[in-house]
Amino acid sequence: MNLIVDIGNSSTKLAVYEGQKKISQSRINDISCEELEKKLSGIKIKKVIVSSVKKLPPFISDLLIANIPFVHVLTHKSQLPFKIEYETPETLGPDRIAAVAGAFNLFPGKEILVIDAGTALTFDFLSANCYKGGNISPGLAMRFRALNKFTDKLPLVSQTENFTFPGRNTSDAIIAGVIAGVTYEINEYIRTFENKRTDFKIIFTGGDSEYLKNKINYKITYMPDIVIDGLNYILEYNAK
């Protein structure tokens, strides 16, 4: 069995795989030693991969190394089946690497645009066996919080399906502005890629992808688990 530990900005995903098949998955807001011990109990884990966009708490490494034969922490130095053409690979988020790895595993040799609508909105481009780079901008929640934090009177709101467009009150004006802004950004980014390429796949993932997926004007492949699938693939690749 493989254990996947994916520590994001907002929450942590834990998943168990048997080969390429996902057996279980859970999400917790704050990972603790007790929570991790609970996940390890009753399951014979042989390999584990840890991906973290934050500083890794020492107890995680200590607990995993003490209980699991093969422990791999994903970094830019991990063995990958594709080349990274990024000027600062040490600053490349492991979640972005994992998403690209998941896409590569599913569609080897293809040109792929991976769009992750999470805490940040990221765009990553894979061409055959080369990661070419990507873009990063604020995600939905970050945009809502920024409008509230950096102004005196704008309220903190969140996405909903029920708002006027254009907004007829301040809350609706914020929601409509943020949702439209993110949607236009994604659609325009895809359109720009489409002007330069005739055949590429679009994978859409991330915490806000389910909310946004029907607002995209292009054919996308909705894959909410592409990051943890990619982590499992990287784990197997490095354990060879």
Image (cartoon, rainbow, N blue to C red):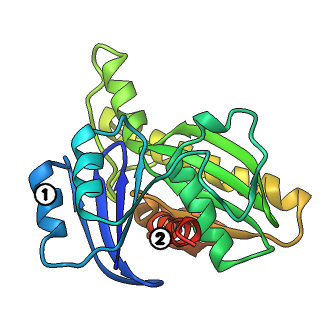
Question: Which residue is disc 2 drawn over?
Answer: 232
At horizontal 83% and vertical 61% (from top left) the residue drawn is: 194
Q: Nearer the viewer, residue 177 or 122?
A: 122
Image position, residue 55 (x, y; %): 36, 34
Q: Is residue 146 left or right of residue 12?
A: right
For the residues bearing labels 2 and 1, Cβ distance under 8 angstroms: no
Q: Nearer the viewer, residue 82 or 128?
A: 82
Q: Quadrant of residue 115?
A: bottom right
Category of crowding for the residue at label 1, using alpha-carbon neighbours closer than 10 angstroms: few (below 14), some (14–19), many (at least 20): few
Q: Is residue 166 visible?
A: no
Q: Is residue 58 visible?
A: yes
Residue 35 - label: 1
* Picture quarter with the N terminus: bottom left
- Quick one: SS at disc 2? helix
Residue type at the position of mark 2? Asn
Image position, residue 33 (x, y; %): 14, 50
Q: Give the Cα separation between the discs numbered 2 and 1.
A: 20 Å
Which circle's residue, 2 or 1, is located before the other in the chain?
Answer: 1
Residue 89 - label: none
Q: Is residue 137 above or below residue 121?
A: above
